[in-house]
Amino acid sequence: MPRILVIYKREDDPRKNTSIKMVRKGLAERVRPGSVRRGVVLDPFSKDVLGAWLRGEVEAGGVVVVDASWKKLHPDVFRGIRGIHVKLPPLLAANPVNYGKPCVLSSVEAVAAALYITGFKEDYVKLLGLFKWMHTFHELNKELLEEYSRASTPAELGKVVVEYWGVNPC
Ligand SMILES: C[S@@+](CC[C@H](N)C(=O)[O-])C[C@H]1O[C@@H](n2cnc3c(N)ncnc32)[C@H](O)[C@@H]1O
């Protein structure tokens, strides 16, 4: 499994936090921002998008997620973290806080999507087992995830987004 690195900002209830659960289950590690050397940083403010062409970077450096509150999230939170910053192509959240909304995923949803799109499908399945609503995430997004994973360039991925969403909501 690629490394999953969590930068945890302690901004919400730790009992409901999804990245803390990934860490507790031994699927992710908690790190300080300065210790990240490379990898794919899941950054909703980036203009670049994650796609299958980043598989090598995920393999080499892992997936970095910044666990902060969506209410307080600001581009500064991501500044200075080394790695390739990318947002995810649009997907629907299934978590109880943002159910049905595009783009505002929980940490576990974001990491799972990144793993699926870059071809780590068995590792994606491991994350589905962490929360009941992760199976709903799968049902809501499985066709889109598969289409996204087949796009081999940003232009191809952009076409899928336009065909499905019209205007990109993220
Ligand atoms: C804002 S935090 C909220 C996490 C929440 N506290 C939890 O328990 O899961 C979610 C993180 O997942 C990643 N993420 C979520 N949606 C994303 C998207 N559309 N594009 C890129 N990264 C995303 C980002 O690293 C973001 O900071």
Image (cartoon, rainbow, N blue to C red):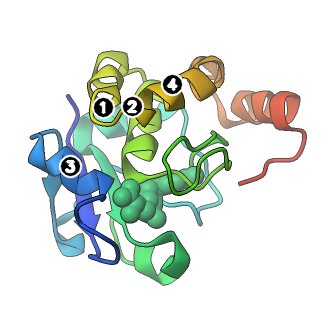
Looking at the image, tell me whether mark 2 or mark 4 is earlier in sequence order. 2
Contact, mark 1 vs mark 2 (Cβ under 8 Å): yes
Q: Which residue is mark 4?
A: 138
Looking at the image, tell me whether mark 2 or mark 3 is earlier in sequence order. 3
In the image, what residue type sits under mark 4?
Answer: His
- Give above or below for 34 relative to 110: below
112 left or right, relative to 123: right
Q: Which residue is mark 3?
A: 21
User: Which of the two discs, 2 and 3, sits closer to the camera?
Assistant: 3
Can you tell which quarter of the image residue 145 is in? Answer: top right
Q: Which residue is mark 1?
A: 127
In the image, what residue type sits under mark 2?
Answer: Leu
- Where is residue 29 drawn, in percent x and y? 14, 52
Near mark 1 (Cα within 10 A), the count class, few <14, some 14-19 or many ≥20, is: many
Which label is found at residue 11?
none
Looking at the image, tell me whether mark 4 or mark 3 is earlier in sequence order. 3
122 left or right, relative to 152: left
- In the rendered image, the quadrant that contains the N terminus is top left
In the image, what residue type sits under mark 3?
Answer: Lys
In this view, the residue in front, 64 or 59, is 64
Q: CA distance from mark 4 to mark 3?
A: 18 Å
